[in-house]
């Protein structure tokens, strides 16, 4: 649900409409356009990147990119100067020099010398920024979850393929050895035939909080922050805690952690389209008006495998506060970013991975840069990131519709449920469109 | 009746929830009566969050009955209240129609929500309530429900965005028709028309879409026309091409680049759709070439290059390579390469290979990597060839691709590559190779062998303990000759348990057959020494299949010379209780009454590799008979041993006149079917065997080992 109708809302909306103007080119589709596709990277060239979205995760990426000899940071971009400016200060110390800072990403896309962008904004901007970057001839690293609806995700894949761009998704587990090892065991039959898998995390803490409407802080282009999402008045709660609102992220922890973990789950079972999905949940301790239910149990049916997504209090399944477990005919395997545990008839073994460093995982960046050169599909290609995102989106839809939803993963529609199908797409606020 | 039942269930739930909430204090009897829908709605609207949470869970169970009360709460100012009412209404809108067994279809609760919301739109409700109702609309409006009250809101600027969103997401033909009408109405504000037009994007399933798109494309407003182009792109009907293409080609020069791009992007989408739809493939290819030739920028040209590649065939290869000679080649090189990778089919692969030497080296490397990963037979074969013969960068890329693509030959290619370039760091290969082995280990024999070869590389080169551990498991599952040193070390350290003994024996046999006698024999000896008694039969079968060497016969304790007498009269009904209750008399010079006349003892020295004696061959094909076989075993010291026999059919054994075993059965022969513990005296021992014949084949086999199945020192005297 969108949030609206308070006094504060009406006032600031009128102000917005008054300033928006109605000139000849107002509310025109405007994608920002370099007029030329990114160059081919020579063997001695570094990939020129700009990080779009300079909040928590954008800062992590920027730090890792500044240290990476394969690339050259050539700009920062955030609708909030209050975010990009402090990061710029850090960049100056990391690189010994400043880089240009942009508030409107369309200026970044219009720069012909930029080879690739990192999209590290809130989720509601991921699809369009990715598509527009492809349409500006640039390669893209986009954070997870890649989309908020299935239709958007498909459009992202199409844009990548239509313009021949490399799109890597921030599901860095695909490049982390502990997961690669664990998955090779699951796929190699160490625990026999896997018939059940589960992914879990603690309670869904992302909530819509009581808002205090104010004018946006200086240097924040709130209209651009909202972008394709419904217009809403500014509040610091919304800006900071956007993951609680379904207009910006479809499920809080369900899509935030869910995509990471369900991605690994689907990787392990070698399937990326559930046959059916059902889900139950609620916010039983109060906060009944939340779209993000605190407690969730979703069941995804795959060929030969039942999978669950579990969110609850005190969730330390297999000794791990979050993770994925595979259950097979000959044993079980638990994995998280730190280690994996194999339990088979011949005993229990725990293998520790590398200590988790940064979510901006350099080998995952390297894989992206390498694929920019070879044009091969990256480790977390957009199609795969989209399929993993859709699994959790489907669970979120099932929470709203109730009942068992049968999924046609080829046509990307529910079977015999037009009402649920409507939740597979969303309207965009003009002038933004897919 | 129904209402009462639900109220009761709800009340019961409430009672339980309340009990849980208040811990020890039990619900007052009064609660049972007073908790009605009205009370629950009050609780939902109250100040207590926890109580609201419980009401939220129960109210949707009232279905349509709860709708009027919930819609009232939807208008409330307090966010927790209206939001909770919103969620309850959404729940109700998704409830299925009540199921009856008489095929009467009752209205789903959604209908009640729809009517209540239509009322909200009509009755001039507060803006806040209207917005919330608009947000619910897509979950509530069915095809036949009239959207007119929402369409009317398009005239209210402050609600237009929300109304357009609701109509777009509801997307019934009636909704879309109304939005299109609004967008087409040139008497309206152009900005509002653009907004409305954009709300039609993405709704290609609508049968009217193309007709409306054509109208919008012709609109005097460039913003509306751009949306028209975009909508028309979703039609892909050939008849629409010229209108779309000429609109893109005849834009005024002062139009912003980004808007111009909308038209060209629409052209690409249009052709993609046409190409995908099939039936107009040649047209689509011609259209891509046209776009490539006249695109205003290299991004649009990239789209045309990719279109030719994604949907095209070998005829696209020259187009793709030609872009490398254009002045804007630097920008088109990425799509050209991406395009070469995207091309499918043998003929396209061949067309690329025909121009191989014209390609830059980085292209060649990228192509073989991609072909190794996901090419068809022809492409994979080329990658395989390059993985053995190309210069290092291309060779490396080809091997990488083959590993990624789980090609059977990849493990071998990698081994050769690593041997050829000892300075190659192994780190980058380690995880891909693990993945490879894990995928291959499930395949046919050739794939299993590849998995083992990959595992062998990991065992030899990885520094990661866990990786070596797993790789060793895979290697043991399919021991390959290349791994002999590793396996022998493993055997010596007592780590044989994971190795299937038959696999190990097959390996030993292969080595012996291939001329590596010494190692093969050593391996077989170690395998036999370590094998459990039950497994030795499997080992023998495998060794036999490999063609057992004479040296092994000795090692295995095969008994190859017998004195045989038969066929003697025998009846199934008698088993071993009649004539053969006691050890037969042994007199090698005697002439005895056989089942078909007089018989005498014959000496047998020709046996199969495991000592198989074909009695039917030696004594003739008979039915209902028995034969006696005798040999003398000499051991230096008293010994406990195991006599391992196979027989067709039943068998009885005496050692030094004492019966040690009998099995009156009807079976075919396999090595080591019966394991018979025996005690031997120092010096000579007499071994007497009776083998019965029911029908069909007739024979037996025997060998003598120590108690563990290992070699026993003995000789057979004639
Ligand atoms: N891969 C991981 O492990 C991982 C970890 C954390 C976050 N993430 C993802 O990263 C994304 C960002 O998360 P965060 O925690 O950094 O959020 P955040 O709110 O801290 O930062 C987002 C930033 O994007 C800016 N922004 C919004 N719209 C923009 C636009 N159109 N152009 C430029 N800037 C824009 C905001 O002003 C804000 O500064 C999320 O999608 C999240 O899921 C991934």
Image: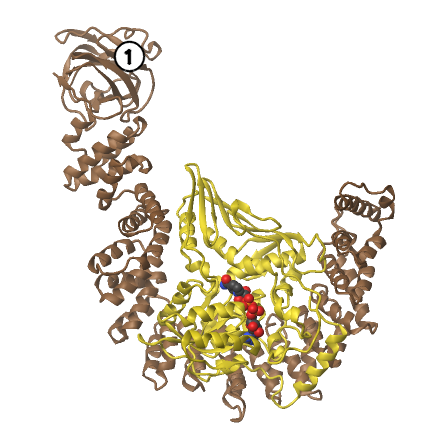
Residue A368 sits above or below residue B417 on the image: below
Closer to the camera, B382 or A64? A64
Question: Helix or strand or loop: what does disc 1 sit on?
Answer: strand
Judging from the image, mark 1 belongs to the subunit labelled: B
Percent x, y of residue A122: 57, 69
Q: Could you say which quadrant of the image residue B501 lies in? A: top left
Judging depth in this view, the residue of B39 and A25 nearest the camera is B39
Q: What residue would you read off at disc 1?
A: B660
Task: Identify whether B402 is placed above or below B483.
Answer: below
Give the colouring mode of the picture: by chain
Which quadrant does the C terminus of chain A fall into?
Answer: bottom right
- Chain A colour is yellow
Q: Report the quarter where the N terminus of chain A lies.
A: bottom right
Residue B90: percent from the left, percent from the top? 72, 60
A317 displayed left or right of B494: right
Q: Residue at x 57, y 60 (%)?
A: A255
Query: Badge 1, how many Cα within 10 Å: few under 14, some, many 20+?
Result: some
């Amino acid at each position: 649900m969108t949030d609206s109708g308070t006094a504060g809302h009406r006032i600031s909306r009128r102000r917005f409409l008054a300033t928006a103007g109605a000139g000849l080119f107002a509310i025109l589709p405007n994608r920002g356009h370099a007029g030329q596709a990114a160059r081919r990277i020579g063997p001695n060239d570094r990939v020129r990147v700009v990080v779009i979205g300079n909040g928590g995760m954008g800062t992590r990426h920027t730090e890792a990119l500044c240290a990476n000899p394969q690339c050259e940071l050539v700009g920062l971009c955030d609708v909030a100067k209050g975010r990009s400016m402090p990061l710029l200060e850090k960049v100056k110390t990391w690189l010994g020099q400043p880089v240009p800072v942009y508030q409107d990403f369309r200026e970044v896309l219009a720069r012909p010398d930029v080879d690739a962008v990192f999209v590290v904004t809130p989720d509601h901007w991921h699809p369009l920024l990715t598509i527009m970057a492809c349409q500006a001839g640039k390669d893209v690293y986009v954070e997870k979850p890649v989309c908020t609806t299935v239709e958007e995700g498909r459009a992202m894949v199409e844009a990548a393929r239509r313009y021949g761009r490399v799109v890597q998704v921030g599901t860095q587990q695909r490049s982390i050895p502990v997961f690669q090892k664990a998955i090779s065991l699951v796929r190699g039959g160490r625990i026999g035939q896997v018939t059940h898998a589960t992914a879990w995390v603690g309670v869904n803490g992302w909530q819509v909080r009581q808002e205090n409407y104010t004018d946006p802080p200086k240097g924040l282009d709130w209209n651009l922050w909202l972008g394709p999402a419904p217009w809403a008045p500014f509040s610091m709660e919304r800006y900071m805690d956007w993951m609680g609102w379904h207009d910006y992220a479809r499920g809080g922890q369900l899509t935030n952690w869910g995509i990471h973990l369900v991605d690994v789950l689907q990787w392990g079972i070698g399937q990326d389209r559930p046959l059916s999905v059902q889900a139950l949940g609620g916010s039983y301790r109060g906060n009944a008006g939340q779209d993000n239910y605190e407690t969730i149990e979703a069941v995804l049916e795959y060929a030969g495998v039942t999978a669950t997504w579990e969110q609850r209090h005190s969730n330390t399944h297999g000794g791990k506060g979050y993770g994925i477990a595979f259950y097979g005919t000959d044993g079980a395997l638990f994995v998280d970013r730190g280690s994996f545990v194999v339990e088979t008839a011949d005993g229990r073994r725990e293998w520790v991975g590398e200590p988790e460093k940064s979510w901006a995982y350099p080998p995952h960046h390297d894989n992206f840069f390498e694929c920019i050169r070879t044009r091969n599909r990256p480790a977390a290609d957009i199609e795969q990131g989209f399929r993993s995102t859709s699994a959790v989106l489907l669970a979120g839809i099932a929470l709203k519709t109730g009942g068992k939803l049968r999924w046609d993963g080829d046509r990307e529609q529910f079977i015999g449920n037009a009402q649920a199908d409507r939740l597979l797409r969303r309207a965009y606020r003009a002038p933004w469109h897919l | 009746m129904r209402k009462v039942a639900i109220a009761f269930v709800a009340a019961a739930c409430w009672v339980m929830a309340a009990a849980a909430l208040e811990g020890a204090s039990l619900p007052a009897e009064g609660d049972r009566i007073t908790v009605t829908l009205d009370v629950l709605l009050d609780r939902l609207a109250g100040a207590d969050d926890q109580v609201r949470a419980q009401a939220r869970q129960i109210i949707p169970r009232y279905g349509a009955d709860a709708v009027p009360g919930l819609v009232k709460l939807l208008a409330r100012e307090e966010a927790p209240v209206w939001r909770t009412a919103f969620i309850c209404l959404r729940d109700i809108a998704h409830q299925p129609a009540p199921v009856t067994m008489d095929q009467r279809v009752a209205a789903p609760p959604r209908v009640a929500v729809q009517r209540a919301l239509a009322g909200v739109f009509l009755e001039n409700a507060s803006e806040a309530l209207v917005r919330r109702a608009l947000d619910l609309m897509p979950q509530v409006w069915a095809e036949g429900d009239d959207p007119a009250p929402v369409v009317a809101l398009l005239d209210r600027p402050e609600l237009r965005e929300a109304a357009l969103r609701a109509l777009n997401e509801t997307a019934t033909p009636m909704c879309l028709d109304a939005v299109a009408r609004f967008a087409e109405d040139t008497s309206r504000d152009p900005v509002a028309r653009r907004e409305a037009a954009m709300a039609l994007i993405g709704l290609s399933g609508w049968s009217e879409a193309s007709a409306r798109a054509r109208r919008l494309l012709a609109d005097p407003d460039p913003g509306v026309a751009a949306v028209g182009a975009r909508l028309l792109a979703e039609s892909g009907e050939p008849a629409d091409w010229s209108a779309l293409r000429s609109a893109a080609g005849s834009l005024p020069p002062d139009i912003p680049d980004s808007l111009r791009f909308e038209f060209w992007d629409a052209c690409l989408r249009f052709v993609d759709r046409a190409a995908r739809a099939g039936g107009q493939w040649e047209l689509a290819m011609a259209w891509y070439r046209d776009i490539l030739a006249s695109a205003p920028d290299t991004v649009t040209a990239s789209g045309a290059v990719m279109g030719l590649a994604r949907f095209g065939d070998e005829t696209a290869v020259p187009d793709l390579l030609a872009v490398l000679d254009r002045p804007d080649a630097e920008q088109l090189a990425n799509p050209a390469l991406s395009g070469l990778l995207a091309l499918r089919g043998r003929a396209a692969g061949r067309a690329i290979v025909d121009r191989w030497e014209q390609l830059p080296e980085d292209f060649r490397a990228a192509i073989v990597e991609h072909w190794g990963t996901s090419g068809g037979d022809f492409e994979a074969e080329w990658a395989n060839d390059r993985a053995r013969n190309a210069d290092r960068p291309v060779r490396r890329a080809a091997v990488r691709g083959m590993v990624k693509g789980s090609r059977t030959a990849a493990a071998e290619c990698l081994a050769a590559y690593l041997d050829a370039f000892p300075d190659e760091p192994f780190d980058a290969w380690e995880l891909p190779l693990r993945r490879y082995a894990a995928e291959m280990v499930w395949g046919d024999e050739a794939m299993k062998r590849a998995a083992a070869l990959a595992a062998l590389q990991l065992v030899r080169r990885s520094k990661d303990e866990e990786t070596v551990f797993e790789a060793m498991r895979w290697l043991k599952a399919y021991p390959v000759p290349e791994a002999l040193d590793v396996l022998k070390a493993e055997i010596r350290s007592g780590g044989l348990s994971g190795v299937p003994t038959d696999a190990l024996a097959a390996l030993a046999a292969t080595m012996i057959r291939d001329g590596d006698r010494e190692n093969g024999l050593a391996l077989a000896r170690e395998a036999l020494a370590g094998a459990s008694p039950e497994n030795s039969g499997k080992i023998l079968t495998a060794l036999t299949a490999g063609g057992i060497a004479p040296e092994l016969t000795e090692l295995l304790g095969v008994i190859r010379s017998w004195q045989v007498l038969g066929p003697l009269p025998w009846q199934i009904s008698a088993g071993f209780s009649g004539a053969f209750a006691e050890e037969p008399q042994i007199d090698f010079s005697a002439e005895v009454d056989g089942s078909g006349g007089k018989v005498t003892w014959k000496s047998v020295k020709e046996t199969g590799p495991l000592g198989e004696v074909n009695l039917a061959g030696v004594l003739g094909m008979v039915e209902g008979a028995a034969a006696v076989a005798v040999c003398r075993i000499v051991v230096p010291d008293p010994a406990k041993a195991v006599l391992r026999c196979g027989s067709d059919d039943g068998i009885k054994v005496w050692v030094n006149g004492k019966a040690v075993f009998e099995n009156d059965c009807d079976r075919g022969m396999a090595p080591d079917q019966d394991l018979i513990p025996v005690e031997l005296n120092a010096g000579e021992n007499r071994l007497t065997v009776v083998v019965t014949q029911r029908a069909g084949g007739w024979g037996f086999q025997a060998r003598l080992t120590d108690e563990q199945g290992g070699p026993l020192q003995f000789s057979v005297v004639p």
